[in-house]
Amino acid sequence: MNRWGLVMIGVAALAGSVGVFGLTVFAQGPGDPKAATEVYQQQCAKCHGDGGAGDGPDAAKTKPVPSDWTAGAGLKGMSDQELYDSIAKGGRAVGKARSMPAYPKLSETEVWNLVALVKSFQK
Ligand code: HEC
């Protein structure tokens, strides 16, 4: 094998490992809804309601009031990434209201789990 052959093998191996790395980074989308229940109850339910209907005790204080996720409101037309950003960076990051706070302290995994939980409220 000449030198170029070796270089090509090297390039292919590199591309392969980058590909696998990319998959593990970006395959996080789905998340585990059950793992998010505790965080949700502590930090989100006061506005979004225990079951995601937008009827938590603080809901009436926000403008606009949180959407009823069980009816699919608020989630329609939003990608997983937009839901992620609205939690991690706040409503403003996705063109929604400031009244949706940002949660920069949650880990990436926690936020993806919350995305999955939020989506699971839809009936
Ligand atoms: C202070 C009340 C409040 C808290 C606490 C809160 N939210 Fe929100 N959230 C809102 C409001 C209000 C909106 C709607 C903003 C709009 O429609 O412009 C919203 C929007 C969202 C959206 C975008 C989809 C939609 O319905 O518009 C997601 C996702 C979301 N919240 C998840 C969460 C999660 C997860 C938590 C807890 C980590 C949380 N929220 C905590 C008030 C809150």
Image: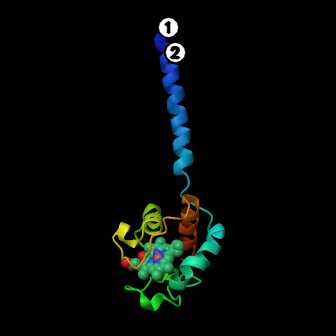
Q: Where is residue 6 in the image (x, y as percent from the top left)?
A: 52, 15
Question: Residue drawn at (54%, 59%), measured in percent from left and top?
Answer: 108
Q: Indicate the quadrant containing the C terminus: top left, top right, bottom left or bottom right.
A: bottom right
Under circle 2, the secondary element is: helix
Q: Residues within 10 Å of mark 1 (few under 14, many from 20)?
A: few
Depicted 98 relative to depicted 106: above or below? below
Depicted 42 relative to depicted 57: above or below? above
- Amino acid carrying mark 2 in the image: Leu
Question: Residue drawn at (46%, 67%), measured in percent from left and top?
Answer: 83
Q: Can residue 75 be seen in this view?
A: no
Residue occupied by mark 1: 2
Q: Splitting the image into 4 quarters, where does residue 52 fall?
A: bottom right
Question: Residue drawn at (51%, 43%), measured in percent from left and top?
Answer: 22
The extreme left residue here reads: 95
Q: Are marks 1 and 2 in contact (CB under 8 Å)?
A: yes
Q: Where is residue 95 in the image (x, y as percent from the top left)?
A: 33, 70
Q: Give whichever of 86, 103 is nearer the camera.
A: 103
Q: Give whichever of 44, 25 is nearer the camera.
A: 44
Depicted 22 relative to depicted 15: above or below? below
Q: Where is residue 113 in the image (x, y as percent from the top left)?
A: 58, 65
Q: Position of residue 91 (x, y in %)?
A: 40, 72
Residue occupied by mark 2: 6
Q: Can residue 61 be seen in this view?
A: yes
Q: Splitting the image into 4 quarters, where does residue 85 fall?
A: bottom left
Q: Give whichever of 104, 21 is nearer the camera.
A: 104
- Amino acid carrying mark 1 in the image: Asn
Label 1 to label 2: alpha-carbon separation: 7 Å
Q: How crowded is mark 2: few (under 14 residues within 10 Å), some or many (20 or more)?
A: few
Ligand 1 contact, mark 2 (Cβ < 8 Å): no
The extreme front residue here reads: 105
